[in-house]
Image (cartoon, helix red, strand yellow):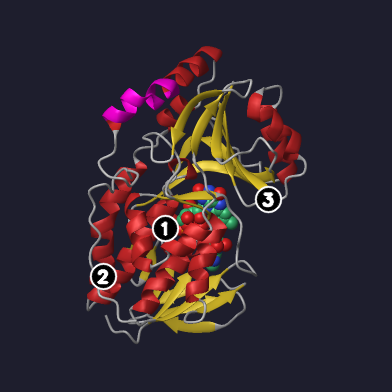
Amino acid sequence: MKINHKILVCGASISGTAIAFWLEKYGYEVVVVEKSDTFRDGGQNVDIKGIGQDVIKLMGLEQQIDSRNTGEEGLRYLNDKGNIISSYPKGAVGGLTSPYEILRGDLARIIYDRTKLRCDYRFGWFVVAISELTDIVKVTFNNGSIEDFDIVVCADGIGSTTRDLVMPEYTHFNYLGAYMSFFKIPKTPEDDLWAKAYQVRGGAMVFLRPGHKNDTTVLVTFLKEEFIPDWQDVSKQKNRLKEVLTAKAGLAERVVQNLDNVQDLYFGPMSQVKASQWSKGRIVLLGDAAHAPTPFTGLGTTLSLVGAYILAGELSQNTSIKDALEQYELIYKPHVELSQKQISPRVIRLIHPQSKFGIMVTRMLTKIFASALIQKLLRPRTEKQEVTGLNDFVLPNYQTIN
Ligand SMILES: Cc1cc2nc3c(=O)[nH]c(=O)nc-3n(C[C@H](O)[C@H](O)[C@H](O)COP(=O)(O)OP(=O)(O)OC[C@H]3O[C@@H](n4cnc5c(N)ncnc54)[C@H](O)[C@@H]3O)c2cc1C
């Protein structure tokens, strides 16, 4: 495709910065608009697994990511008294911890820093109207300015408003019957470098993971059959979390004690995005905007990094935009769909046992799975963690010019 093309990317998180990285390497003029007034540093531990690690190597970011590694050593399941039930060290089957353990904001910041001098980042900007003419996309921004682009990439996350302006008919949300909340709490002396998981009676889970120097990151998930639209208010969200966790022992108790002081609460339904088509004309979806798998899979970041690599590569290889966008979807969508299938409302219910008996059984299972014998039997084929749907996927080889 002609390298004098001007490409608009909406969203400056993982997928937005990653596609900017590659497009710039292929010689395109790249404008990235981000709705937030400043770069968004927040977020918790994200995992870069399997083939996502190959993309990081191709980007030459291993060392920088390593220097921001949270140092997580593995995952431990704890009982009500805080005693260890089972341990999954880094690399164990069924564990969480990947060789690249990094906070979302740190990863996005690394890619942003790599690209900010060569791409035109505009903070506080977002698209309010968009129309595709014969060979150009005319975009109106929130500040009233109008500009023409050859291609628009919607990398603006699960609730992508740019996608909704263009192709709402393709977007489907798959509510998984649970809510999730992320935030951080102060680190205490008992917080070592192990992630900790605790099952709470009534169908909830608490995960604590190493964050920045003085922080421990928290993920709380809990079953909720129906989607509740009026949980928008932060105090209502905190109250709901307290209801789910109060009077429970173990890590739940500590989380409740800290909740009132939490400043960075993210709270929302656990939903997958399934876009039936990833592009319309010259406008294309990337990352969570196309296929959010839910943070529970730990795959959102990996899928976004791989998708950005393929989309940019196909744009550079094909002479027509239409062919490039079709190829991107053809090559990648079947794998993404497979990887999304690993999570369903049924799986979510199994992970969140509600009764004392159910918790006892799952705790026993975590112990059995962590045993040396089972780990040996299940040993992964490679050192890299498996990524359902992408284990046999071979990254296409594209030639960059910068
Ligand atoms: C602040 C933040 C914290 C997160 N924390 C976690 C976490 O703890 N654990 C986890 O698993 N995942 C987290 N995620 C989601 C995770 O980043 C994604 O699942 C995955 O990395 C794919 O990223 P993405 O770039 O496609 O979407 P996202 O990371 O959701 O990024 C979308 C970006 O687009 C911006 N944006 C939104 N609307 C517009 C618009 N109309 N125009 C321009 N820009 C727009 C957003 O501000 C954001 O920067 C977080 C995302 C964000 C933004």
Image point (35%, 26%), residue name: 372
Mark identifier at residue 324: 2
Please tell me whether mark 3 sits on a helix, a strand or a loop: loop
Rendered view: 184 above or below 394: above
Residue sitting at 46 percent across and 45 percent down?
A: 294
Residue 287's label in the rendered image is 1
Q: Amino acid at mark 3?
A: Asp
Residue count near mark 3 (Cα–Cα under 10 Å), binned few <14, some 14–19, many ≥20? few
Q: Is mark 1 within 8 Å of ligand 1?
A: yes
**Magenta residues?**
366-377
Q: CA distance from mark 2 to mark 3?
A: 39 Å
Q: Is residue 132 magenta?
A: no
- Give me the residue at 33% from left, 50% from top: 50
Q: Residues within 10 Å of mark 1 (few under 14, many from 20)?
A: many
Residue that carries the numbered disc 3 in the rendered image = 264
Residue 157, image x and y in percent?
49, 58
**Magenta: main secondary structure:** helix
Left or right: 400 in relation to 49: left
Residue at 66 percent of width and 41 percent of height? 231
- SS at mark 2 in the image: helix
Q: Is residue 159 visible to the viewer in this orientation of the structure?
A: no
Q: Percent from the top left, x then y, of residue 249?
A: 67, 22
